[in-house]
C-alpha cells in the first residue's frame, strides 16, 4: 500500500488515487469461459454470475473464493448532535460500540451466521468532530490521518471487505455531504435517521442548510467537503476503500452513511469505486438516488436502515454463494449431462 507523508495531506490522497490498479480482465474472461460449461443454462444465475466476474477482476483469480471476509465498522461522534438532530444522545455511540464488543448487536449475529470476520473501531469518541453549523468538522491533517487509520484496518489477508459505521448524528453529516456534492433541495437528502419526529426533521434540515451556507466557498473540492462536513467514520471508510483498491480487495458498501464515503471518492474520480459493490439500498433518506448517481445497483433491497454494516454483511452471504456456485458446480462433462445442441 502506498505510504502517506505529512507534507501535503490531501495531495497524498490524490496521489494514491492516481496510482490505483485496474481490474484484471484476463481473470474475468477465464470466469466466463468456465461458466459456459457449468451445469446450468447461460445467464440463469442472473447477478450471481456478474458478482463472480467482479470478484475475479479484483482478486485476480480465475476461480475467485471468499475465505476471509471482513466487516469493518467505525464509530465516531459529531458536534452537530448539539443541534437536536437525533432523538438519542451522543453517549449511545459508545454504548453501541460496547454492544458490538459483547456480541449483542444485529451485525454480530449476521457475521456469525455467514462466518464473516468483524472488527469495530473507536475513532476518538470522547473528541467529537466540530459542529459543522459553526466550524469545520476536521482540519486537513486530522481528516487524512483518519483516512490513513482506515487504510490500516484491512490488514490480515482478507479477500473481501465491507464498510459500516456507528455514530449518533451521522445521517445529518451524510445528508450535508450529499447536498454539497449534488445540490438541489436540501430536504431531499435528509431522512429521519434513528427516528426524529417532524420537529427533529426540521432541525436536521436547518442544520444542513446552515452548514452548506457556512462552508459554501470551499465545497467545490470533494476532499474539502469531507473534512468540513464529514466525520471520522466517513473518513476512515474512505480510507478502507482506497487501501482495498491498492491491495486489489473487492469492497462491499453498506447503507446511507457508508455510501457518503464512497460518494466523496467518486466525486474525486469515478473509477475509485470500480472495485466496490453496493450491499443494499437503505430506506434512509435518498440513498437510492445516490446509488443511481454512483452507478451502483444494490445486491439487496430489504427496507433496512440500521447501519453498522448490517446490509453489507447480508450481501456477503449472497456473494459467498455466488463464488461457491461458480467454483463448486460440475461442468456438463463432469456430471455427464448433455450440453446444449450447437
Image: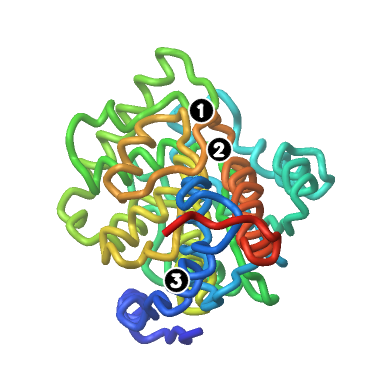
Q: Nearer the viewer, residue 18 or 81?
A: 18
Q: Nearer the viewer, mark 2 or mark 3?
A: 3
Quadrant holding the C terminus: bottom left
Label 2 – label 3 distance at C-alpha: 41 Å
Counting labels gives: 3
Residue farthest to the right?
102
Q: Position of residue 201 (x, y in %)?
A: 39, 21
Q: Position of residue 52 (x, y in %)?
A: 53, 61
Image-based side of 19 in relation to 120, left or right: left
Helix, strand, or loop for circle 2? loop
Q: Residue at x 42, y 48 (%)?
A: 259
Q: Are marks 2 and 1 in contact (CB under 8 Å)?
A: yes
Q: Which residue is mark 3?
A: 28
Q: Nearer the viewer, mark 1 or mark 3?
A: 3
Image-based side of 11 in relation to 129, left or right: left
- Residue 189: quarter of image: top left
Q: Are marks 2 and 3 in contact (CB under 8 Å)?
A: no
Helix, strand, or loop for circle 3? helix
Tell me the tag on residue 168. 2
Q: Position of residue 134 (x, y in %)?
A: 32, 44
Tell me the tag on residue 86. 1
Image-based side of 2 in relation to 16, left or right: right
Label 1 – label 3 distance at C-alpha: 45 Å
As drawn, 227 above or below 145: above
How would you rate the neighbour count of disc 3 (Cα within 10 Å): few for under 14, some for 14-19, many for 20 or more? many
Image-based side of 26 in relation to 34, left or right: left
Label 2 – label 1 distance at C-alpha: 7 Å
Q: Position of residue 268 (x, y in %)?
A: 26, 64
Amino acid at each position: 500500500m502506498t505510504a502517506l507523508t505529512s507534507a501535503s495531506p490531501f495531495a497524498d490522497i490524490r496521489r494514491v488515487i492516481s496510482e490505483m490498479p485496474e481490474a484484471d480482465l484476463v481473470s474475468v474472461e477465464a470466469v466466463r469461459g468456465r461458466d459456459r460449461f457449468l451445469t446450468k443454462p447461460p445467464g440463469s444465475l442472473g447477478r450471481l454470475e456478474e458478482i463472480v466476474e467482479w470478484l475475479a477482476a479484483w482478486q485476480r483469480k480465475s476461480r475467485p473464493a471468499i475465505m476471509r471476509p471482513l466487516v469493518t465498522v467505525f464509530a465516531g461522534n459529531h458536534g452537530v448532535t448539539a443541534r437536536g438532530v437525533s432523538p438519542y444522545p451522543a453517549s449511545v455511540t459508545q454504548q453501541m460500540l460496547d454492544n458490538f464488543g459483547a456480541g449483542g448487536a444485529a451485525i454480530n449475529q449476521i457475521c456469525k451466521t455467514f462466518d464473516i470476520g468483524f472488527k469495530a473501531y473507536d475513532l476518538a469518541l470522547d473528541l467529537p468532530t466540530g459542529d459543522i453549523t459553526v466550524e469545520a468538522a476536521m482540519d486537513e491533517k486530522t481528516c487524512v490521518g483518519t483516512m490513513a487509520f482506515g487504510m490500516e484496518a484491512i490488514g490480515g489477508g482478507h479477500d473481501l471487505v465491507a464498510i459500516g459505521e456507528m455514530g449518533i448524528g451521522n445521517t445529518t453529516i451524510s445528508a450535508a455531504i450529499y447536498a454539497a456534492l449534488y445540490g438541489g433541495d436540501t430536504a431531499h437528502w435528509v431522512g429521519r435517521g434513528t427516528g426524529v419526529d417532524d420537529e427533529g426533521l426540521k432541525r436536521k434540515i436547518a442544520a444542513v442548510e446552515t452548514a452548506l451556507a457556512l462552508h459554501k466557498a470551499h465545497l467545490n473540492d470533494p476532499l474539502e467537503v469531507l473534512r468540513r462536513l464529514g466525520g471520522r467514520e466517513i473518513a476512515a471508510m474512505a480510507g478502507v476503500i482506497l487501501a482495498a483498491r491498492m491491495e486489489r480487495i473487492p469492497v462491499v458498501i453498506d447503507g446511507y452513511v457508508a455510501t457518503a464515503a464512497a460518494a466523496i471518492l467518486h466525486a474525486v474520480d469515478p473509477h475509485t469505486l470500480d472495485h466496490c459493490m453496493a450491499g443494499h439500498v437503505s430506506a434512509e433518506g435518498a440513498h437510492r438516488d445516490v446509488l443511481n448517481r454512483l452507478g451502483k445497483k444494490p445486491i439487496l433491497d430489504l427496507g433496512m436502515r440500521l447501519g453498522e454494516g448490517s446490509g453489507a454483511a447480508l450481501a456477503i452471504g449472497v456473494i459467498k454463494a455466488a463464488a461457491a456456485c461458480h467454483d463448486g458446480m460440475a461442468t456438463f462433462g463432469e456430471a455427464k449431462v448433455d450440453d446444449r445442441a450447437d
